[in-house]
Amino acid sequence: MNWTTICAFEALPPERGVCALVEGAQVAIFRTYEDEVYALGNLDPFSGAYVLSRGIVGTRLGEPTVASPLHKQVFSLATGRCLDDASVSVPRYAVRVGVGGHVEVSLEQRVEVGV
């Protein structure tokens, strides 16, 4: 499995997102106040813009989420599914805090969300 080191875990501010280029794909990485990390595709499927990393991180019914900064559709950080339109989702990638406290992403562990 290929893991790409993104940054130190401590460099990720809680409840914020950052964007990283991983093997040519834009990946949005998020850290919650509970210190969980998530990785989604950065492309907002509603606007066609690469902006999800700039979205508003929060929760809906206890589920960690990000709201697109453009049209405010809300996506689950856990599954990538749009909570406002179940027919739409974004890719979710495997992410971990690896040796030395660095955030790592693997595109090989992409999780497809069914409709």
Image (tube, rainbow, N blue to C red):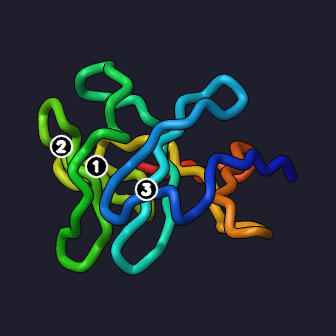
CB under 8 Å between discs 1 and 2 = yes
Q: Which residue is mark 2?
A: 73
Q: Quadrant of residue 87?
A: top left
Of mark 2 and mark 3, the one earlier in the sequence is 3
Of mark 3 and mark 1, the one earlier in the sequence is 3
- Residue 111, horizontal then vertical, whole percent: 60, 53
Q: Amino acid at mark 3?
A: Phe
Distance CA(mark 2)–CA(mark 3): 17 Å
Q: Amino acid at mark 1?
A: Cys
- Residue 37, horizontal then vertical, whole percent: 50, 65
Camera-side mark, 2 or 3: 3
Q: Which residue is mark 3?
A: 30
Q: Which residue is mark 1?
A: 82
Distance CA(mark 3)–CA(mark 1): 16 Å
| Residue at 76%, 68% in the rendered image | 100
Distance CA(mark 1)–CA(mark 2): 7 Å
CB under 8 Å between discs 2 and 3 = no
- Residue 59, horizontal then vertical, whole percent: 22, 69
Which residue lies most toward the left here?
Answer: 71
